[in-house]
Amino acid sequence: MEPLTNRSKTLVRKPMNLAERAYLPVIVGGMAITMKHFFRKKATIQYPEVKREFAPVYRGVHILKRDENGAERCTACGLCALSCPAEAITMTAAERKPGEELLYREEKYAAVYEINMLRCIFCGLCEEACPKEAIFLSDSIAIANYDREGLVYGKDRLVEPMDPKGHINTVEEAERQKWFKSR
Amino acid sequence: MDIFFLLSKTILVVLIFTISLVVAMYSTLAERKVAAFLQDRIGPNRAGPLGILQPLADGLKFFFKEEIIPNASSKFLFIAGPGIAMMTATMTSAVIPWGEPLTIAGRQVSLQVADINIGILYIFGVVSLGVYGVMIGGWASNNKFSLLGAVRASSQMISYELAMGMSVIALLMITGSLSLKTIVEQQSGWHWNVIYQPLGFLIFIVCAFAECNRSPFDLAECESELVGGYHTEYSSMKLGFYLFAEYINMFISSAVISTLYFGGYNFPFIHSLGLSPNWLSIVGVVVFFAKISFFIFFFMWVRWTIPRFRYDQLMKLGWQVLLPLSIINILLTGGAMAFFK
């Protein structure tokens, strides 16, 4: 029969010669290989101290962004919840009161914003749906808790923390923008 | 039998006992480190700097674990098993010469607990007792996996003791003595027995792996077939004793290999250093321990390289390859001795 590919190999089953039957040459060869690995650079990343670098578009735990003045960008439009295939996002909208302009960017904001991390599949569709560039998936991966309630993340854990100087961390953001521009 | 003699022997016994326990303890860490390094990992490094305190943590864990004695086991033997394994493991070190005699306050202090003239026979006797620990423990557990492991261990040890003894006979034809002290003294400088007995050494080291139940001959505790082998039912420090005994056995067989084939505490150019006799014997002890450490490393290196033998392959290797080979080795040695004399 004509072979379909040229990848097939004929199996040669000739009896082993003395050196092969004595095993020792191959054992020495194997030990040489393991000894080579003994001196090789180790693949271990010592986790809590050293963290593995992720791609700039890595999809980890969500983060709700603030704008350059430190006001929350989210307007509770609900597009993220709509786009979510796992139905993990819920939110309650509220109206901005006068004097809260520095807290919320638009007149409408999310009073409650919850993502159920047990339901979330980290697909990133919320990030794509967001018209205000408010929600992003960060490179944080440490999600752990003792009960299910603890895995429903509220605004306390989702909104980007402000540093004491009042402006937000833009290095990661710049990196992300650069990556998007390069495409 | 004066007080100085008793005192020096007591100190030596306690010292050697402690050293073999400490070496066994740190072998467990070394095993994990070597395994990690051969697999491109780092290994335990959290307990103390470089994981130095890891064995202590492991030992502590063993003590705090719940102790389970199966209802259907025969309790006395179940408890006696690990004790026998541990005792026979630590007994062997008595006849190994650790160094040349020291001179303290005008007296000769031998660095060997007992220079008996049947040193090798003593080692063989005690090592073959060692299988009782495994056998009794495995049988007393009343568990089919334990029993299978014990049966495997005992038949494996009996098969390989034969070839081991035969390979040593060829060595004894050269040395003409059973005393380990005399054998070491004959190997001063570069006259190591491994040069005269390469085949015998090969047979001996393969059999030593089998005797220690070490990979590639660790069929007695082969996890993929027998759960834990003879120590399936064991927990807490009793399991610790079995594992510990294995490491002590490894230490002792490394010491025996270095003594019989690699000159013990001898090393080349020993007399051109120009040191006083006491310093020379201390350097000798250090060299001896370096050799032992190398062989312990070698044991681990082999374990993390070579896959386990199948049981029929193990028996075939023991009876059909190593035993005839060691007999041929005896013939060759005898022929060579007759030819060169």
Image (spheres, rainbow, N blue to C red):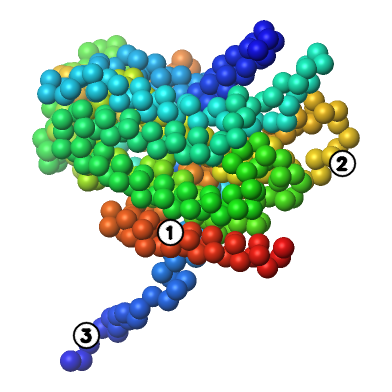
Quadrant in which residue B119 is drawn: top right
- Report in which chain the residue with disc 1 lies: B
Q: Secondary structure at mark 3?
A: loop
Viewed as shown, does residue B169 lie left or right of B146?
Answer: right
| Residue A3 image offset from top left, x and y in percent | 22, 87
Q: Find residue B101 and report its image quarter.
A: top right
Q: Residue at x 82, y 16 (%)?
A: B106
Binning the other alpha carbons within 10 Å of mark 2 as few (below 14), some (14 to 19) or many (20 upward) gives few
Examine the image and state in which quarter residue B67 appears: top left
The answer, for residue B30, to whether it is visible in the render is no
User: Dot 1: what SS?
Assistant: helix
Q: Nearer the viewer, mark 1 or mark 2?
A: 1
Q: Which residue is mark 1?
A: B322
Q: Reading the chain from its start, which is encountered first: label 1 or label 2?
A: 2
> Is residue B314 shown left or right of residue B14?
left
Position of the C terminus of chain A by quadrant: bottom left
Residue density around tag 3, few if under 14, some if 14–19, many if 20 or more, within 10 Å: few
Q: Are marks 1 and 2 in contact (CB under 8 Å)?
A: no
Q: Is residue B225 above or below residue B279?
A: below
The Cα atoms of the two marked residues, 1 and 2, are separated by 40 Å
Q: Residue at x 45, y 42 (%)?
A: B35
Q: Residue furthest bottom?
A: A1
The chain carrying label 3 is A
Q: Residue type at mark 2?
A: Ser
Q: What residue is disc 2 on? A: B272
Which of B186 and B11 lies nearest the eye of the viewer? B186
Residue occupying the point 67% across, 7% down: B3
User: Which of pointers 1 and 3 indicates the residue nearer the eye?
Assistant: 1
